[in-house]
Structure formats: C-alpha cells, structure tokens
Image (cartoon, rainbow, N blue to C red):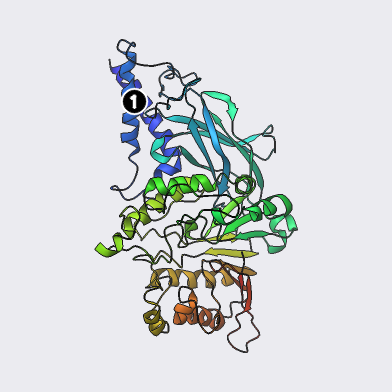
Amino acid sequence: MRILLLSALVAHASATRLLDNNLVYRSPFLKDISLAHDTPAIQARHIQHVRRQMSDAAPFDDQHYPTFYGADFGNSPFIWTGGINFTHSVASGDPFDTSVLLWTRAVPVSPSGTTQLPDQSVPVCVAYKISTSPTLEGRIVDSGQAFTSYDVDFTVKVEASGLKPDTEYHFQFSDCSSPSSVSPIGKTRTIPNPNTPANQVNNGHPLTLAVFSCSQFQAGWFNAYGFAAHNTSAQFFVHLGDYIYESLGNGAAIGRQTLGRELATIHDYRQRLNQYRTDASLVFAHQNAPWITVCAGFDDHEVADNAWKAGTADSNDTTVGCSFSASGACFTDRKLAAVRAYHEWMPIRQVDADDKFRIWRNFQMGKLLDLTMLDTRQYDRDLTDVYYNTEFVNTIADFSNRSLMGTAQEKWFFDTLSESRARGAVWRVVGQQIVFTQLNESGSFDLDAWDGYRANRLRVLDHLYSNSIQNTVILAGDSHANWVSDLARTSLDTAIYQVKLN
C-alpha cells in the first residue's frame, strides 16, 4: 500500500510538472491566486480517471488512457492518445541570448468516423525539440514535454533554454503518444549577448527588424507578413500593436468576414485570435522568425477602441459604461479576458500581475542596440480622447502631470535609455503604440496620440538631449499612415528620429 501510494504521488507530481512546463498556465496571472490557473487542481481532475482502472470498464471508454509513460510504469499520467492536430503551425518569440519561447496549438482529434467531440477531461501531451539543424537531424540542444487542455484553449508555450547567443535554431512539436505525429518545423533565433561588440552582432552582417502594426482581418490580406518572411532577411519581427481588432466589419471587398461579435468575453477574444492566425502569411511569418511585441502586444484594439487605464471609447467600469459592451462586460472584464487570451495565443513572456500587468521590457542586442518596448496604452495612461470628450482633453493636453506611461514606467524608460548609453550601445530603438511627433492634420491634433500628452513628450526629449543620448529611433503604430519625422528639439547636433511604419 505504501509503495502504491508513493507511486501515485510521484505520478501526480510528474504530471503537475508537465502542466507547469506549459507557460500558458502560468500567464498572465501567475501571482494572482484568484485569477491564475490552479495546475494541481487541474491535475487532480485528470487523475480522477485512475478509478476507471479499478472498476468495471463497461460504462467507460478507456481506449485512450495508456497505462505507461515511456518505460517508467510508476509515472503513468493519463493522456490523450486519439491523435492531435497542430491547427495553427508553430511560433516563437521574446528571445533572450540563451533562451526563446516556443508556441503551438495541439487540439485533440475527434474519434475516427464520428463528429463526437474528444474527451476534454483528458490532458494532451506535447513534446518539443530544438536544434541548429534545419531538419532537426543534428544534435538536439533542448527538448521536453508539456501538457495542455481546454483550460488554455489547447495552446502550448514552452521556454527552450541552454541555447547559444545570436544563433539560428529550428524547432518542432510532436504528439507524446505518437511521435510520428509532428508539427511543421519552425525557425527562430536568440539575440546577441549584451557584451557582443556591435560589429560582431549577427556575425558582422546587418541586423534587420521587420516592423508591423494595425492588422485588420476584414480589411485586407496580410501580405506584408508574407513578404517580410519570404523576401527579406529580417531576423526579428516587431509588432507595435493592434494585432487584432475587436470590431466586426463585413469584409465585403475581399470576403473576409470576422466571426462572432464585438469582443467582450474570453471566448470572443480566443475566437478572434484563432481566426486571425489562419491567414497564410501570418502563419508563415510566425513560423519563420521570433516575434517581439509592444507591451505584450497591446495597443487599444486588442481590448477595445481608444483604451486607457480605466476604460475605452465604448466601455468603462460604470453602470452606463458597462452597457456599451456587446455582452454587458465592463472594461476590467474585457481587459482581463483579452490579456488572458493574448497570452495563450502569443509567444510572449509572463506579465507582472502585481503591478498593473506591467509588461514593458528591454532587449539588449549586443553593443549594437537596445530594443525597448513600452506600454503607452494600458499600464497607467491618463484619460484619453474617447470621442465625446475631445474638447475637454484638448484643454488639458499641455498639463504637466499628464502621463502616457505612468511615473514608474517613465522612470524605468529614462533609466533604460541612460543605461544603454552608459554600456556603449550604438543605437536605441523604442517600440511603442502611438505617433510621437507633433502632427497637425487639417488644423487638428490626434489627442489619443502623444499630441494629447505634450508635457510627457517634452520630458522624453529633455532626457535625451540633456544626457546626450544619441541615435534614438522611436517607432510608432496606430495611425494607418507612413511618417518619418526629425524630432530635433533644439539646434544641438544630435538628431532624434521618429519613424512611423505600417
């Protein structure tokens, strides 16, 4: 009895570890017990099927519950063996110098010849491996297994570690119960070590970033993703926000109508991300390069239009504001659902749930550049233009206490810029969501951009000039247009360029 109990405990711990290996269960609410996935509870739900081996099998369909796991009969988690479908290929993102996140979606296949849904109480086990060989026939640098389930929309996100800096890798997922069932092979890479001399980054070849923003499924095919993946040498794909749109639209011009309704619930956001990730060019772009996204991808439309820290143009946490949502969901409900779904579907790292979902971060790519990704939308942004308050926002746009980033992020940003200069980085590239330059369009300014937070913009320029921080490029999304602006504030020799790319 003691031996059997110990074996069961070992099996339980092993299976819980395989759940924890899938980082989707841990993000984005790892530290918030009320919101996080309780992996021990999920495993307890899985392990309850042990009783089926102890009783008459007639009432149950036990054909997909194996009694072995490799050669260790003591670690016998019950996993799906009816086949899985890697529905959305593979992806990678948030690369470090010795690790990178790998992503896939592994959906259990319905029993052969039926329309019956798979038993969703059974976990799906997915294995992964990564190598420098394009065919994965060389030495496997890292490998492992992880569980997924309907709790996280059958998504899988693991961290491949022990990698070499500034190196290209290839990776693949497979079905633990049927190793011959595999995903497409993905291509990714690590960033250089922070101390790599600038002229040695990317083996001395130019380092190229492909930059995107504002991709609306019903408005056009995502050919730009495909062009970048097929026809450029870009090593990293950077997305500046509005990866999805919460609105509907009928897609009349090209026939790409979005599914569902205006996004409000976890199902809505999952369905929209699912549909976007069926675009052939987007699938290929994710499969062939690591992605880095602003503030874990959030501009406004990943939640709802013109979002700020306490609401959007059509919802907030008031009785009236909640009524604007298609489902009656308030802003906080929508934001939490959007954050969870996005972290399930994207190869991005854990946010800090203890600090307003802080997700701003910096990538030191050798001594060549720092890629600093900000959150100028969701973290601690003051009131923005939500259409009915335009005149009021215009009267406060110059107020010195208005902030797009919040005090904590602004200090971190300035410290990061200064540290970048001090460590000898040649360039500073800042990824953020909205147009930085002053932009007078027919006598009016976009108050939802930096023109609505003019003192905050001035503080950024003052820090750059007063500290002689040169070679700073500020990227922006949102405006659906192409802009290139020289942001030189004074007659100093230093020039700061702001680039708006779509």
Residue 188 % position (x, y): 63, 46
The residue identified by callout 1 is: 47
Task: Report the amino acid beneath label 1.
Answer: Ile
Hey, which quadrant is residue 237 in on the image? bottom right
User: Is there any visible trace of residue 227 in the rendered image?
Assistant: yes
Q: Residue lying at the far left in this picture: please name it.
A: 319
Q: Residue at x 54, y 36 (%)?
A: 87
Hey, which quadrant is residue 423 in on the image? bottom right
Q: Helix, strand or loop at disc 1? A: helix
Q: Residue at x 44, y 51 (%)?
A: 350
Query: Quarter holding the N terminus?
Result: top left
Q: Nearer the viewer, residue 78 or 4?
A: 78
Residue 18 % position (x, y): 43, 33
| Residue 49 placement, left or right of 67 | left
Question: From the viewer's perspective, is residue 475 above or below residue 392?
Answer: above
Q: Residue lying at the far front in this picture: please name it.
A: 252
Query: Quarter holding the C terminus?
Result: bottom right
| Residue 256 placement, left or right of 58 | right
Hey, which quadrant is residue 172 in on the image? top right
Question: From the viewer's perspective, is residue 271 above or below residue 432?
Answer: above
User: Is there any visible trace of residue 471 in the rendered image?
Assistant: no
Q: Nearer the viewer, residue 401 or 116?
A: 116
Residue 81 % position (x, y): 48, 22
